[in-house]
Amino acid sequence: MSGKECFEILDKVFSPKNKENLDDIKGYTIKYGNIVNDREIIDEVLVSYFKAPKSYTTEDMCEINSHGGNIVMKKILELCLKNGATLAEPGEFTKRAFLNGRIDLTQAESVIDVINAKSDKEAKTAINQLEGALSKKISEIKKEIMDVMINIEVAIDYPEYDVEDATNQQILEMLNSVEEKLVKLSKSFDEGKILKEGIKTAIIGKPNAGKSSLLNAVLKEERAIVTEYEGTTRDTIEEFITIEGVPLKLIDTAGIRDAKDEVEKIGIKKSREIANTADLVIAIFDSSKELDREDIEILELIKNKKSIIILNKCDLEGKIDEKNIKLNESSEYIIKISALKNIGIDLLYEKISELFNLNQINIDNDVLITNIRQKDFINKAIENVKKAKETIGNKMTTDIVAIFVKDILEDLGSITGEFVTEDIINEIFSKFCLGK
Ligand code: GDP
Protein backbone atom coordinates (compact mmCIF):
# COMPACT_ATOMS: atom_id res chain seq x y z
CA MET A 1 0.00 0.00 0.00
CA SER A 2 1.15 3.50 -0.74
CA GLY A 3 -0.15 6.88 0.37
CA LYS A 4 -0.95 9.02 3.36
CA GLU A 5 -3.41 6.64 4.98
CA CYS A 6 -1.61 3.37 4.40
CA PHE A 7 -0.34 3.00 7.98
CA GLU A 8 -3.80 3.76 9.36
CA ILE A 9 -5.29 1.03 7.21
CA LEU A 10 -2.45 -1.32 8.08
CA ASP A 11 -3.11 -0.74 11.76
CA LYS A 12 -6.67 -2.07 11.33
CA VAL A 13 -5.59 -5.35 9.76
CA PHE A 14 -2.14 -6.05 11.19
CA SER A 15 -1.46 -7.19 14.71
CA PRO A 16 2.31 -7.07 15.33
CA LYS A 17 3.95 -9.29 17.92
CA ASN A 18 5.63 -6.26 19.50
CA LYS A 19 3.30 -3.34 19.25
CA GLU A 20 5.04 0.03 18.84
CA ASN A 21 3.92 3.56 18.22
CA LEU A 22 3.99 4.37 14.53
CA ASP A 23 6.29 7.34 15.20
CA ASP A 24 8.80 5.02 16.84
CA ILE A 25 8.95 2.68 13.85
CA LYS A 26 11.74 3.72 11.54
CA GLY A 27 11.58 3.42 7.76
CA TYR A 28 13.12 0.25 6.29
CA THR A 29 11.88 -1.79 9.25
CA ILE A 30 10.28 -5.21 9.04
CA LYS A 31 7.82 -6.25 11.72
CA TYR A 32 6.47 -9.71 12.42
CA GLY A 33 2.86 -10.43 13.29
CA ASN A 34 -0.55 -11.60 12.06
CA ILE A 35 -3.09 -10.27 9.65
CA VAL A 36 -6.39 -10.45 11.50
CA ASN A 37 -10.01 -9.98 10.57
CA ASP A 38 -11.86 -9.26 13.84
CA ARG A 39 -10.25 -12.04 15.89
CA GLU A 40 -9.64 -14.48 13.08
CA ILE A 41 -5.99 -14.86 12.04
CA ILE A 42 -5.71 -14.82 8.25
CA ASP A 43 -1.96 -15.41 8.02
CA GLU A 44 1.32 -14.94 9.77
CA VAL A 45 3.18 -12.18 7.96
CA LEU A 46 6.15 -9.84 7.75
CA VAL A 47 5.37 -6.18 7.13
CA SER A 48 7.95 -3.75 5.74
CA TYR A 49 7.62 -0.07 6.59
CA PHE A 50 8.82 2.69 4.29
CA LYS A 51 8.43 6.24 5.43
CA ALA A 52 8.01 9.19 3.05
CA PRO A 53 9.99 10.32 1.17
CA LYS A 54 12.23 7.27 1.27
CA SER A 55 10.11 4.78 -0.63
CA TYR A 56 9.49 3.62 -4.18
CA THR A 57 6.64 6.10 -4.62
CA THR A 58 8.14 8.69 -2.20
CA GLU A 59 4.94 8.28 -0.14
CA ASP A 60 4.45 6.36 3.09
CA MET A 61 4.39 2.72 2.06
CA CYS A 62 4.05 -0.72 3.54
CA GLU A 63 4.38 -4.19 2.07
CA ILE A 64 2.73 -7.25 3.52
CA ASN A 65 4.61 -10.50 2.94
CA SER A 66 2.34 -13.45 3.53
CA HIS A 67 2.98 -17.12 2.91
CA GLY A 68 1.30 -16.65 -0.45
CA GLY A 69 -1.26 -18.81 -2.14
CA ASN A 70 -4.29 -17.41 -3.89
CA ILE A 71 -6.86 -17.70 -1.12
CA VAL A 72 -4.82 -16.07 1.63
CA MET A 73 -3.54 -13.29 -0.61
CA LYS A 74 -7.02 -12.57 -1.85
CA LYS A 75 -8.32 -12.44 1.71
CA ILE A 76 -5.60 -10.00 2.81
CA LEU A 77 -6.25 -7.84 -0.23
CA GLU A 78 -9.99 -7.81 0.42
CA LEU A 79 -9.39 -6.92 4.04
CA CYS A 80 -7.24 -3.93 3.09
CA LEU A 81 -9.85 -2.80 0.57
CA LYS A 82 -12.61 -3.17 3.16
CA ASN A 83 -10.65 -0.95 5.51
CA GLY A 84 -10.24 1.90 3.06
CA ALA A 85 -7.54 1.01 0.56
CA THR A 86 -8.29 1.26 -3.15
CA LEU A 87 -7.00 -1.18 -5.73
CA ALA A 88 -3.98 0.11 -7.65
CA GLU A 89 -4.29 0.70 -11.37
CA PRO A 90 -1.76 -1.06 -13.60
CA GLY A 91 1.63 0.56 -13.00
CA GLU A 92 0.22 2.90 -10.39
CA PHE A 93 3.16 2.58 -7.99
CA THR A 94 5.63 3.46 -10.73
CA LYS A 95 3.32 6.19 -11.98
CA ARG A 96 3.30 7.76 -8.53
CA ALA A 97 7.10 7.54 -8.41
CA PHE A 98 7.12 9.47 -11.69
CA LEU A 99 4.45 12.02 -10.73
CA ASN A 100 6.20 12.63 -7.42
CA GLY A 101 9.43 13.30 -9.29
CA ARG A 102 11.52 10.41 -8.02
CA ILE A 103 12.12 9.01 -11.50
CA ASP A 104 11.63 10.43 -14.96
CA LEU A 105 9.58 8.92 -17.76
CA THR A 106 12.44 6.99 -19.38
CA GLN A 107 13.16 5.35 -16.05
CA ALA A 108 9.50 4.52 -15.52
CA GLU A 109 9.36 2.96 -18.97
CA SER A 110 12.41 0.88 -18.21
CA VAL A 111 10.63 -0.77 -15.29
CA ILE A 112 8.37 -2.63 -17.76
CA ASP A 113 11.41 -3.49 -19.84
CA VAL A 114 13.16 -4.99 -16.83
CA ILE A 115 10.11 -7.11 -16.07
CA ASN A 116 9.62 -8.25 -19.65
CA ALA A 117 13.29 -8.83 -20.48
CA LYS A 118 13.89 -12.01 -22.43
CA SER A 119 17.67 -11.99 -22.50
CA ASP A 120 20.63 -10.92 -20.38
CA LYS A 121 21.51 -8.04 -22.66
CA GLU A 122 17.97 -6.76 -22.72
CA ALA A 123 17.73 -6.89 -18.95
CA LYS A 124 21.05 -5.08 -18.63
CA THR A 125 19.98 -2.32 -20.99
CA ALA A 126 16.75 -1.88 -19.09
CA ILE A 127 18.57 -1.67 -15.77
CA ASN A 128 20.95 0.86 -17.32
CA GLN A 129 17.99 2.97 -18.32
CA LEU A 130 16.39 2.52 -14.93
CA GLU A 131 19.58 3.85 -13.41
CA GLY A 132 19.11 6.95 -15.55
CA ALA A 133 21.63 6.42 -18.39
CA LEU A 134 19.28 7.74 -21.05
CA SER A 135 18.09 10.60 -18.85
CA LYS A 136 21.71 11.61 -18.34
CA LYS A 137 22.42 11.56 -22.06
CA ILE A 138 19.32 13.63 -22.78
CA SER A 139 20.17 16.17 -20.15
CA GLU A 140 23.70 16.53 -21.58
CA ILE A 141 22.19 17.32 -24.96
CA LYS A 142 19.69 19.65 -23.34
CA LYS A 143 22.53 21.52 -21.72
CA GLU A 144 24.14 22.05 -25.10
CA ILE A 145 20.85 23.37 -26.44
CA MET A 146 20.61 25.73 -23.48
CA ASP A 147 24.04 27.07 -24.45
CA VAL A 148 22.73 27.64 -27.95
CA MET A 149 19.80 29.53 -26.43
CA ILE A 150 22.15 31.76 -24.47
CA ASN A 151 24.05 32.65 -27.63
CA ILE A 152 20.79 33.42 -29.37
CA GLU A 153 19.55 35.62 -26.52
CA VAL A 154 22.79 37.60 -26.67
CA ALA A 155 22.36 38.15 -30.39
CA ILE A 156 18.75 39.25 -29.90
CA ASP A 157 19.44 41.50 -26.92
CA TYR A 158 22.50 43.26 -28.26
CA PRO A 159 21.90 43.69 -31.98
CA GLU A 160 24.00 46.85 -32.02
CA TYR A 161 27.17 44.78 -31.53
CA ASP A 162 26.66 43.34 -34.95
CA VAL A 163 28.04 40.01 -33.86
CA GLU A 164 25.43 38.09 -35.74
CA ASP A 165 27.69 36.41 -38.27
CA ALA A 166 30.16 35.18 -35.71
CA THR A 167 27.38 34.09 -33.39
CA ASN A 168 25.56 32.28 -36.18
CA GLN A 169 28.67 30.37 -37.06
CA GLN A 170 29.04 29.36 -33.45
CA ILE A 171 25.39 28.36 -33.15
CA LEU A 172 25.71 26.30 -36.32
CA GLU A 173 28.63 24.39 -34.89
CA MET A 174 26.79 23.73 -31.66
CA LEU A 175 23.74 22.52 -33.56
CA ASN A 176 25.91 20.17 -35.61
CA SER A 177 27.26 18.63 -32.45
CA VAL A 178 23.75 18.19 -31.04
CA GLU A 179 22.54 16.67 -34.30
CA GLU A 180 25.35 14.14 -34.33
CA LYS A 181 24.48 12.96 -30.84
CA LEU A 182 20.77 12.74 -31.60
CA VAL A 183 21.36 10.78 -34.79
CA LYS A 184 23.50 8.32 -32.87
CA LEU A 185 20.73 7.84 -30.32
CA SER A 186 18.12 7.41 -33.02
CA LYS A 187 20.25 4.78 -34.75
CA SER A 188 20.70 2.90 -31.51
CA PHE A 189 17.00 2.10 -31.71
CA ASP A 190 17.70 -0.67 -34.21
CA GLU A 191 20.06 -2.32 -31.76
CA GLY A 192 17.60 -1.71 -28.97
CA LYS A 193 14.85 -3.27 -31.03
CA ILE A 194 16.94 -6.38 -31.60
CA LEU A 195 17.53 -6.68 -27.88
CA LYS A 196 13.95 -6.10 -27.02
CA GLU A 197 11.99 -7.96 -29.62
CA GLY A 198 14.59 -10.42 -30.75
CA ILE A 199 15.57 -11.20 -34.31
CA LYS A 200 12.50 -12.57 -36.02
CA THR A 201 13.80 -15.68 -37.66
CA ALA A 202 12.11 -17.90 -40.22
CA ILE A 203 13.27 -21.35 -41.16
CA ILE A 204 12.15 -22.23 -44.67
CA GLY A 205 12.82 -25.08 -47.05
CA LYS A 206 11.18 -27.84 -49.02
CA PRO A 207 9.48 -30.70 -47.22
CA ASN A 208 12.09 -33.10 -45.84
CA ALA A 209 14.95 -30.62 -46.14
CA GLY A 210 15.28 -30.90 -42.35
CA LYS A 211 13.45 -27.87 -40.92
CA SER A 212 12.04 -29.59 -37.90
CA SER A 213 15.27 -31.49 -37.31
CA LEU A 214 17.13 -28.17 -37.30
CA LEU A 215 14.57 -26.68 -34.97
CA ASN A 216 14.97 -29.58 -32.58
CA ALA A 217 18.76 -29.42 -32.73
CA VAL A 218 18.73 -25.72 -31.98
CA LEU A 219 16.18 -25.96 -29.20
CA LYS A 220 17.98 -28.87 -27.61
CA GLU A 221 21.27 -27.05 -27.55
CA GLU A 222 19.93 -23.83 -26.12
CA ARG A 223 17.73 -23.50 -23.16
CA ALA A 224 14.74 -22.41 -25.18
CA ILE A 225 12.19 -20.09 -23.72
CA VAL A 226 8.73 -20.92 -24.94
CA THR A 227 6.11 -18.30 -24.42
CA GLU A 228 2.50 -18.99 -24.88
CA TYR A 229 0.13 -16.08 -24.83
CA GLU A 230 -3.01 -16.51 -22.90
CA GLY A 231 -6.09 -17.65 -24.74
CA THR A 232 -4.41 -18.37 -28.02
CA THR A 233 -3.85 -21.51 -29.98
CA ARG A 234 -0.61 -23.33 -30.61
CA ASP A 235 -0.01 -21.24 -33.71
CA THR A 236 1.20 -18.30 -31.72
CA ILE A 237 3.65 -20.14 -29.54
CA GLU A 238 6.91 -18.30 -29.86
CA GLU A 239 10.20 -19.93 -29.23
CA PHE A 240 13.25 -17.95 -28.25
CA ILE A 241 16.85 -18.96 -28.26
CA THR A 242 19.60 -16.56 -27.31
CA ILE A 243 22.82 -15.95 -29.16
CA GLU A 244 25.42 -13.65 -27.62
CA GLY A 245 22.73 -12.57 -25.21
CA VAL A 246 20.40 -11.55 -28.03
CA PRO A 247 17.08 -13.34 -28.38
CA LEU A 248 16.18 -15.03 -31.62
CA LYS A 249 12.46 -15.31 -32.07
CA LEU A 250 11.64 -18.30 -34.19
CA ILE A 251 8.57 -17.76 -36.35
CA ASP A 252 5.93 -20.34 -37.04
CA THR A 253 7.65 -23.14 -35.23
CA ALA A 254 4.23 -24.63 -34.58
CA GLY A 255 3.65 -24.74 -38.33
CA ILE A 256 6.91 -26.61 -38.87
CA ARG A 257 6.23 -29.10 -36.11
CA ASP A 258 2.62 -29.79 -36.90
CA ALA A 259 3.12 -30.38 -40.58
CA LYS A 260 3.06 -34.14 -40.45
CA ASP A 261 1.97 -35.23 -43.87
CA GLU A 262 3.15 -33.97 -47.22
CA VAL A 263 0.00 -31.99 -47.95
CA GLU A 264 0.30 -30.04 -44.75
CA LYS A 265 3.96 -29.21 -45.12
CA ILE A 266 4.79 -25.60 -45.68
CA GLY A 267 4.75 -24.73 -49.38
CA ILE A 268 6.47 -21.98 -51.34
CA LYS A 269 3.59 -19.54 -50.98
CA LYS A 270 3.52 -19.86 -47.22
CA SER A 271 7.33 -19.73 -47.11
CA ARG A 272 7.22 -16.41 -48.94
CA GLU A 273 4.72 -15.01 -46.44
CA ILE A 274 6.84 -16.12 -43.51
CA ALA A 275 10.07 -14.84 -45.08
CA ASN A 276 8.50 -11.45 -45.68
CA THR A 277 7.78 -10.88 -42.01
CA ALA A 278 11.21 -12.06 -40.85
CA ASP A 279 14.39 -10.16 -40.04
CA LEU A 280 16.40 -13.25 -40.84
CA VAL A 281 15.62 -16.17 -43.13
CA ILE A 282 17.36 -19.49 -42.70
CA ALA A 283 16.85 -21.41 -45.94
CA ILE A 284 17.57 -25.08 -45.58
CA PHE A 285 18.33 -27.51 -48.40
CA ASP A 286 18.84 -31.25 -48.53
CA SER A 287 22.39 -31.41 -49.85
CA SER A 288 22.13 -35.09 -50.66
CA LYS A 289 19.83 -34.19 -53.53
CA GLU A 290 20.38 -31.95 -56.54
CA LEU A 291 18.74 -28.53 -56.47
CA ASP A 292 15.36 -28.65 -58.18
CA ARG A 293 12.92 -26.03 -59.41
CA GLU A 294 11.36 -25.56 -56.00
CA ASP A 295 14.78 -25.03 -54.40
CA ILE A 296 15.58 -22.40 -57.01
CA GLU A 297 12.31 -20.63 -56.16
CA ILE A 298 13.32 -20.57 -52.52
CA LEU A 299 16.73 -19.15 -53.49
CA GLU A 300 14.95 -16.45 -55.49
CA LEU A 301 12.76 -15.41 -52.61
CA ILE A 302 15.64 -14.89 -50.18
CA LYS A 303 17.70 -12.82 -52.61
CA ASN A 304 17.04 -9.45 -51.03
CA LYS A 305 16.75 -10.63 -47.45
CA LYS A 306 19.20 -11.13 -44.65
CA SER A 307 19.65 -14.83 -45.00
CA ILE A 308 21.72 -17.88 -44.27
CA ILE A 309 21.75 -20.88 -46.56
CA ILE A 310 22.08 -24.23 -44.87
CA LEU A 311 23.20 -27.26 -46.80
CA ASN A 312 21.80 -29.92 -44.52
CA LYS A 313 22.55 -33.62 -44.28
CA CYS A 314 26.29 -33.10 -44.71
CA ASP A 315 26.71 -36.55 -43.20
CA LEU A 316 25.43 -38.00 -46.49
CA GLU A 317 27.09 -37.89 -49.88
CA GLY A 318 26.77 -34.34 -51.20
CA LYS A 319 25.03 -33.42 -54.47
CA ILE A 320 25.11 -29.64 -54.04
CA ASP A 321 28.37 -27.75 -54.33
CA GLU A 322 28.94 -24.87 -51.88
CA LYS A 323 30.36 -22.86 -54.78
CA ASN A 324 27.15 -23.24 -56.80
CA ILE A 325 26.46 -19.87 -58.44
CA LYS A 326 22.73 -19.93 -57.69
CA LEU A 327 23.46 -20.30 -53.98
CA ASN A 328 26.09 -17.60 -53.96
CA GLU A 329 23.83 -15.19 -55.80
CA SER A 330 21.23 -15.51 -53.05
CA SER A 331 23.31 -15.25 -49.90
CA GLU A 332 26.91 -14.77 -48.89
CA TYR A 333 26.40 -17.06 -45.93
CA ILE A 334 26.41 -20.71 -46.89
CA ILE A 335 27.13 -23.40 -44.35
CA LYS A 336 27.13 -27.16 -44.22
CA ILE A 337 25.51 -28.88 -41.28
CA SER A 338 23.87 -32.06 -40.21
CA ALA A 339 20.78 -31.34 -38.17
CA LEU A 340 20.37 -35.02 -37.41
CA LYS A 341 23.93 -35.60 -36.24
CA ASN A 342 24.22 -32.20 -34.61
CA ILE A 343 27.17 -31.11 -36.73
CA GLY A 344 27.80 -27.44 -37.50
CA ILE A 345 25.08 -25.85 -35.36
CA ASP A 346 27.71 -23.60 -33.78
CA LEU A 347 28.66 -22.44 -37.28
CA LEU A 348 25.08 -21.29 -37.71
CA TYR A 349 25.32 -19.24 -34.51
CA GLU A 350 28.60 -17.72 -35.66
CA LYS A 351 27.06 -16.60 -38.93
CA ILE A 352 24.00 -15.11 -37.26
CA SER A 353 26.24 -13.22 -34.89
CA GLU A 354 28.28 -11.94 -37.84
CA LEU A 355 25.25 -10.97 -39.87
CA PHE A 356 23.78 -8.80 -37.12
CA ASN A 357 27.05 -7.66 -35.53
CA LEU A 358 25.81 -9.13 -32.29
CA ASN A 359 29.15 -9.00 -30.54
CA GLN A 360 29.29 -5.28 -31.21
CA ILE A 361 26.04 -4.47 -29.50
CA ASN A 362 27.71 -3.00 -26.52
CA ILE A 363 25.26 -2.21 -23.85
CA ASP A 364 27.77 -1.34 -21.21
CA ASN A 365 29.01 1.91 -22.68
CA ASP A 366 26.31 3.02 -25.00
CA VAL A 367 22.88 4.27 -24.26
CA LEU A 368 20.26 2.49 -26.29
CA ILE A 369 16.83 3.75 -27.20
CA THR A 370 14.47 0.85 -26.76
CA ASN A 371 11.07 2.25 -27.40
CA ILE A 372 9.34 3.87 -30.33
CA ARG A 373 7.95 6.76 -28.29
CA GLN A 374 11.43 7.85 -27.35
CA LYS A 375 12.66 7.38 -30.90
CA ASP A 376 9.83 9.51 -32.33
CA PHE A 377 10.77 12.44 -30.13
CA ILE A 378 14.47 12.07 -30.92
CA ASN A 379 13.58 12.18 -34.62
CA LYS A 380 11.39 15.24 -34.07
CA ALA A 381 14.28 16.92 -32.30
CA ILE A 382 16.57 16.07 -35.25
CA GLU A 383 14.03 17.64 -37.63
CA ASN A 384 13.98 20.81 -35.56
CA VAL A 385 17.79 20.95 -35.46
CA LYS A 386 17.74 20.74 -39.26
CA LYS A 387 15.14 23.52 -39.47
CA ALA A 388 17.15 25.73 -37.12
CA LYS A 389 20.25 25.16 -39.26
CA GLU A 390 18.33 25.97 -42.43
CA THR A 391 17.02 29.15 -40.90
CA ILE A 392 20.54 30.26 -40.13
CA GLY A 393 21.64 29.26 -43.63
CA ASN A 394 18.86 31.36 -45.12
CA LYS A 395 20.05 34.37 -43.12
CA MET A 396 16.74 34.72 -41.29
CA THR A 397 16.67 36.65 -38.06
CA THR A 398 17.86 35.03 -34.90
CA ASP A 399 14.46 35.08 -33.21
CA ILE A 400 13.16 32.62 -35.81
CA VAL A 401 16.08 30.30 -35.08
CA ALA A 402 15.10 30.60 -31.43
CA ILE A 403 11.64 29.16 -32.16
CA PHE A 404 13.11 25.93 -33.52
CA VAL A 405 15.66 25.69 -30.76
CA LYS A 406 12.88 25.95 -28.18
CA ASP A 407 11.07 23.14 -30.01
CA ILE A 408 14.15 20.94 -29.68
CA LEU A 409 14.10 21.50 -25.93
CA GLU A 410 10.46 20.54 -25.82
CA ASP A 411 11.03 17.38 -27.83
CA LEU A 412 13.75 16.31 -25.44
CA GLY A 413 11.57 17.23 -22.48
CA SER A 414 8.84 14.96 -23.82
CA ILE A 415 11.22 12.01 -23.66
CA THR A 416 11.99 12.51 -20.00
CA GLY A 417 8.43 13.53 -19.19
CA GLU A 418 8.67 17.25 -18.46
CA PHE A 419 6.36 18.05 -21.33
CA VAL A 420 3.87 15.24 -21.72
CA THR A 421 0.13 15.13 -21.71
CA GLU A 422 -1.89 13.10 -19.27
CA ASP A 423 -3.08 10.86 -22.10
CA ILE A 424 0.45 9.84 -22.93
CA ILE A 425 1.23 9.16 -19.28
CA ASN A 426 -1.88 7.04 -18.95
CA GLU A 427 -1.05 5.11 -22.07
CA ILE A 428 2.46 4.36 -20.87
CA PHE A 429 1.35 3.09 -17.49
CA SER A 430 -1.56 1.08 -18.85
CA LYS A 431 1.06 -1.33 -20.23
CA PHE A 432 2.19 -2.22 -16.74
CA CYS A 433 0.82 -5.10 -14.76
CA LEU A 434 -1.04 -4.60 -11.51
CA GLY A 435 1.03 -3.97 -8.45
CA LYS A 436 4.06 -2.57 -10.24
P1 GDP B 1 11.17 -30.98 -42.70
O1 GDP B 1 10.10 -31.59 -43.50
O2 GDP B 1 11.91 -29.94 -43.47
O3 GDP B 1 10.78 -30.51 -41.34
O4 GDP B 1 12.27 -32.16 -42.51
P2 GDP B 1 12.53 -33.09 -41.25
O5 GDP B 1 13.31 -32.37 -40.23
O6 GDP B 1 11.27 -33.74 -40.83
O7 GDP B 1 13.52 -34.15 -41.90
C1 GDP B 1 13.13 -34.99 -42.97
C2 GDP B 1 13.91 -36.31 -42.92
O8 GDP B 1 15.32 -36.03 -43.10
C3 GDP B 1 13.81 -37.00 -41.60
O9 GDP B 1 13.74 -38.39 -41.81
C4 GDP B 1 15.10 -36.66 -40.89
O10 GDP B 1 15.52 -37.64 -39.96
C5 GDP B 1 16.06 -36.54 -42.01
N1 GDP B 1 17.17 -35.63 -41.72
C6 GDP B 1 17.08 -34.36 -41.26
N2 GDP B 1 18.30 -33.83 -41.09
C7 GDP B 1 19.20 -34.78 -41.47
C8 GDP B 1 20.63 -34.83 -41.52
O11 GDP B 1 21.34 -33.90 -41.20
N3 GDP B 1 21.17 -35.98 -41.98
C9 GDP B 1 20.42 -37.05 -42.36
N4 GDP B 1 21.06 -38.14 -42.78
N5 GDP B 1 19.10 -37.04 -42.30
C10 GDP B 1 18.46 -35.93 -41.88
Image (spheres, rainbow, N blue to C red):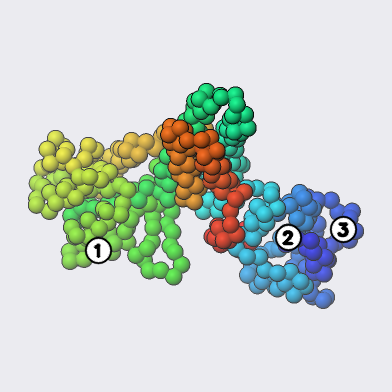
- Given this view, does label 3 or label 2 mark the residue nearer the observer? 2
The percent position of residue 285, horizontal first and vertical second, equals 18, 48
**Is 274 on the left-hand or right-hand side of 231?**
left
Instruction: Name the amino acid, label 3.
Output: Leu
Q: Residue at x 73, y 52 (%)?
A: 58
Q: Quadrant of the N terminus?
A: bottom right
- Give residue 205's position: percent from left, percent from top: 20, 52
- Report if residue 295 is visible in the image: no
Q: Nearer the viewer, residue 28 or 218?
A: 28
Q: Which residue is disc 3 drawn over?
A: 22
Where is mark 2, residue-wise?
Answer: 2
Residue 250, relative to residue 232: is it above or below?
above
Q: Quadrant of residue 167?
A: top right
Res 261 quadrant in image = bottom left
Q: CA distance from mark 3 to mark 1?
A: 65 Å
Instruction: Give the mark nearest the N terminus, 1 or 2.
Output: 2
Q: Residues within 10 Å of mark 2 (few under 14, many from 20)?
A: many
- Identity of the residue drawn at 24% across and 53% down: 204
Q: Is mark 1 within 8 Å of ligand 1?
A: yes
Are the residues at dot 3 and dot 1 in contact (C-beta closer than 8 Å)?
no
Residue position for label 1: 259
Determine the CA span between mark 3 and mark 2. Answer: 16 Å
User: In the figure, 132 relative to 163: above or below?
Assistant: below
Nearest to N terminus: mark 3 or mark 1: 3
Is residue 64 or residue 93 the one in the foreground? 93
In the displayed structure image, the side of residue 194 where residue 140 appears, left or right: right
The mark nearer the N terminus, 3 or 2, is: 2
Of residue 408 and residue 105, the one placed in the foreground of this image is 408
